[in-house]
């Protein structure tokens, strides 16, 4: 786990808890992507806006960085040879038709056991042979080999038989095959620029962007670039240790293409601001700044005191209580500011979580300390 501290105050898990009325958890997207609400929280005085106003809040020369990951139909249902029901959430595709998955079942099958997904290979579905745990024998995930009737790849099998893996707080009955919201979810739980398949959760801040907003940003002179981080199911897991140093952060794969490095360099040279769309983009850019690795797995854990080196502003949704994302935005914009704006959002009945509304944050100024001065002088790797 890569955790960073250094804040004058010591934070604990309970500091990031808050009461949220269940009615504010969005179960469906807004009628129009950019018609959602936007809480302008760049300054202490909060301003309630609509998302389509975002281009008016940015400047020519700024750089918006998106996560272009694509959500895959990773949730698949089936049964064991004994007849017991089983659900797989495929988190990662490996080589040789192997995958890594979460498994929901009453009793875990033995290694070597064959699971019959969507009726199994003989019935037009596919079989999944359990090979063991992942990434080691103590791992929480499972490694399986998928076998389809025509030798299909895992990607093809998921596309044919899988369901979009919506977050647990969005109530759906996808396993019945009769969910009336399935077509809507397949379209709206995906960004308009998604192109690299591999995520089991959407980069939700980017769900608000539509072609009209993108055209307005281009007309304003705001440059665009993209990274890829395949969001894992761990993004929905609350932190469970009161001492944040004891939390084991989940790992996710990211990639930064060379054109994005060049765009970051141009933005820095012209004095523009780097605006990350979503916490996954922040994790990607700040992981690269820390390690210099353009493509890697990251388990970076951003908590108050973290010295940001790349991102100046952040577009993000409202997050779960006690989540690592609450800690990230608190590190970025300041704990007191975040907790205050969340209370404002609740009072004004903003919609929360994946299908909810958004906010625009500005990175708080570094405290006047020797540590902050060192962090400010520690520039990210130059583009090459």
Image (cartoon, grey):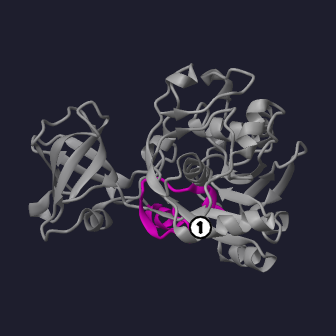
Q: Mark 1 Cα within 10 Å, few/some/many (few <14, many 20+)?
A: some
Residue 253 appears anywhere in the view: no
What residue sits 63% from the left and 21% below the top? Answer: 12
Q: Nearer the viewer, residue 86 or 206?
A: 206
Give the image location of residue 71, x and y in percent.
Answer: 44, 60
185 in the magenta segment: yes
Res 206 → quadrant? bottom right
Give the image location of residue 375, x and y in percent.
Answer: 71, 40
Quadrant where the C terminus is found in the figure: bottom right
Left or right of residue 137, residue 48 in this image = right
Left or right of residue 130, residue 208 in this image = right
Q: How many marks?
A: 1
28 in the magenta segment: no
Give the image location of residue 49, x and y in percent.
Answer: 82, 58
What residue sits 76% from the left and 36% below the top? Answer: 372
What residue sits 55% from the left and 52% below the top? Answer: 288
With respect to residue 311, does 307 lie above or below?
A: above
The residue that label 1 is drawn on is 260
Which segment is the magenta one?
180-208
Q: Nearer the viewer, residue 204 or 167?
A: 204
Res 10 → quadrant? top right
Residue 111 appears anywhere in the view: yes
* Element assignment for label 1: helix
Q: Nearer the viewer, residue 281 or 76?
A: 281
Give the image location of residue 293, x and y in percent.
Answer: 49, 53
Left or right of residue 178, residue 34 in this image = right
What residue sits 61% from the left and 55% below the top? Answer: 381
With respect to residue 61, does 359 lie above or below?
A: above
């Amino acid at each position: 786990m890569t955790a960073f501290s250094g804040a004058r105050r010591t934070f604990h898990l309970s500091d990031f808890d808050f009461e949220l009325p269940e009615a504010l958890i969005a179960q469906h997207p807004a009628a129009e992507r950019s018609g959602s609400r936007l809480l302008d929280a760049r300054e202490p005085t909060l301003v309630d806006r609509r998302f389509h106003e975002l281009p008016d809040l940015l400047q020519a020369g700024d750089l918006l960085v998106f996560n272009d990951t694509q959500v895959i139909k990773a949730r698949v249902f089936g049964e064991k040879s004994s007849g017991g029901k089983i659900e797989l959430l495929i988190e990662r595709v490996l080589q040789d038709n192997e995958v890594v998955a979460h498994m929901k079942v009453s009793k875990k099958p033995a290694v070597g056991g064959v699971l019959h997904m969507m009726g199994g290979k003989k019935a037009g579905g596919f079989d999944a042979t359990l090979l063991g745990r992942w990434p080691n024998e103590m791992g929480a995930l499972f490694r399986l080999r998928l076998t389809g009737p025509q030798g299909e790849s895992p990607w093809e099998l998921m596309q044919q038989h899988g369901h979009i893996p919506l977050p647990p707080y969005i109530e759906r009955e996808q396993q019945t095959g009769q969910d009336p919201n399935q077509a809507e979810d397949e379209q709206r739980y995906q960004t308009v620029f998604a192109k690299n398949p591999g995520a089991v959760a959407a980069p939700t801040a980017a769900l608000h962007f539509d072609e009209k907003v993108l055209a307005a940003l281009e007309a304003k002179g705001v440059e665009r670039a993209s990274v890829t981080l395949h969001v894992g199911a761990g993004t929905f897991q609350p932190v469970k240790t009161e001492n944040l140093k004891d939390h084991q952060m989940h790992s996710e794969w990211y990639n930064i293409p060379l054109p994005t490095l060049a765009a970051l360099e141009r933005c820095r040279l012209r004095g523009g601001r780097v605006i990350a769309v979503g916490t996954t983009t922040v994790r990607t850019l700040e992981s690269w700044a820390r390690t210099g690795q353009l493509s890697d797995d990251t388990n970076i854990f951003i908590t108050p005191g973290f010295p940001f080196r790349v991102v100046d502003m952040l577009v993000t949704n409202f997050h779960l209580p006690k989540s690592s994302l609450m800690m990230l935005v608190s590190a970025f914009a300041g704990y007191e500011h975040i907790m205050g704006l969340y209370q404002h959002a609740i009072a004004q009945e903003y919609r929360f979580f994946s299908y909810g509304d958004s906010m625009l944050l500005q990175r708080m100024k570094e405290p006047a300390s020797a540590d902050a001065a060192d962090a400010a002088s520690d520039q990210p790797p130059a583009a090459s």
